[in-house]
Amino acid sequence: MGASSDRITAAEFVTPPELAEWSLAASGAGRIGGVRLELIADAAVTHLGYCYQQVPLRVLPPFSFGPGQPSLVYLLNPTAGLMDGDAQLVQLRSSPDTRAVVTGQSATRIHPAIRGFSTQQWIIQVAKGAVLLVLPGPAIPFQGCRYFQRISIELEEGADLVWGDLWFAGRYERGDASERFQFQTIVQETAVRRAGRLVFRDRFCWHGPWDEAMAAWHFGSGPACGSLFVTGSIEDNTGAARFATVAGDTCFRWRGESEPVVASVVGTALKAAGQKSGGIWLKQADIAPNHWFSC
């Protein structure tokens, strides 16, 4: 991870081969940015260590719910989403004994691409004894968008992580103007390493637009899908597709209608993180029902 105060530039972003002919914004001001932050534990409360913010992302000071509960950290995008050429970098270190939920304030809207592509890329380090839950929020690809999501996670031995992904069909409740599965290209790449050894890799490249048959093959009859990566194993009765990795970690998959998929991903994620730390994370009494992750 680079020095916390170094300016984030286009040179720090990876371009996948599928989007090699496209580029990020030529002028990065207000378009290429992100955050670098460290979470540290002090007296059973997790708070910010260093924190660098560069438009278009911002960080809210953590909300604390008392001993045994995680701190809630919001990443804010004050713009309307990811425009063509935008790039957002999130570099996050969760130090020993931290307990945190890191989340976006709402869904990520991915706007149409005209000259380039947009990207959000995560570099996460989780220390021994930390429990970190990351829920970026649902991704909503608009018609004609080109988008790359890259997640690179490094775990120390004894670190716990829950990572959740949610994908929607686009702006689909619009009658004849529906953009259901009308994106151009979406690439996602997730890699998790433990003590430097690759223990999980998930990658896909979707080329659109999709017709009904292609959409049904990927999503079934619904407009949403979700997945979770959880270190180790957890007790669950979610009814999700579930498999254990060779390294002993767990992956879950859901597909269906948007609200049930979101509720399943978030509910299972909070339960998994709570099991790792011996508590119940983000009780409904602690958060208002208007959060996208309220379930």
Image (cartoon, rainbow, N blue to C red):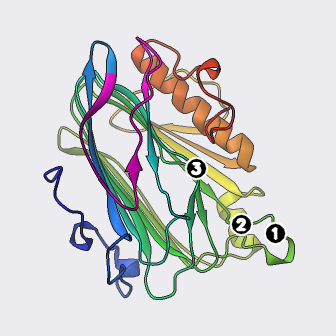
Q: CA distance from mark 3 to mark 2?
A: 15 Å
Residue at the far right in the pictured view: 175
> Does residue 57 lie above or below 65 as drawn?
below
Q: Position of residue 62 (x, y in %)?
A: 40, 32
Q: Which residue is mark 2?
A: 171
Q: Earlier in the sequence, mark 1 or mark 3?
A: 3
How far apart are the alpha carbons under marks 2 and 1?
Answer: 7 Å
Q: Is residue 165 visible?
A: yes
Whether residue 240 is visible to the viewer of this picture, yes or no, is no
Marks 3, 2: nearer the viewer: 3
Hey, which residue is sitting farthest left in the picture? Answer: 3
Mark 1, mark 3: which one is toward the viewer?
Answer: 3
Q: Are marks 2 and 1 in contact (CB under 8 Å)?
A: yes
Label 1 SS: loop
Is 294 one of the magenta-colored residues?
A: no
Q: What residue lies at 53% left-to-right and 16% top-to-bottom? A: 280
Is the residue marked by circle 2 packed among few (<14), some (14-19), or many (20+) residues within 10 Å? some
Amino acid marked by disc 3: Ser
Q: Amino acid at mark 1?
A: Arg
Q: In x, y percent, where is residue 186? A: 51, 70
Helix, strand or loop at label 3? It is loop
Q: CA distance from mark 1 to mark 3?
A: 20 Å
Q: Which residues are magenta?
A: 46-71
Pointer 3 residue = 106
Q: Which residue is mark 1?
A: 174
CA neighbours of label 1 inside 10 A, class few (<14), some (14 to 19), many (20+):
few
Q: Residue at x 51, y 63 (%)?
A: 79
Could you say where residue 98 lies in the image, as x and y percent from the top left? 31, 24
Q: Residue at x 32, y 13 (%)?
A: 44
| Element assignment for label 2 | loop
Q: Tell me: residue 150, above or below residue 102.
A: below
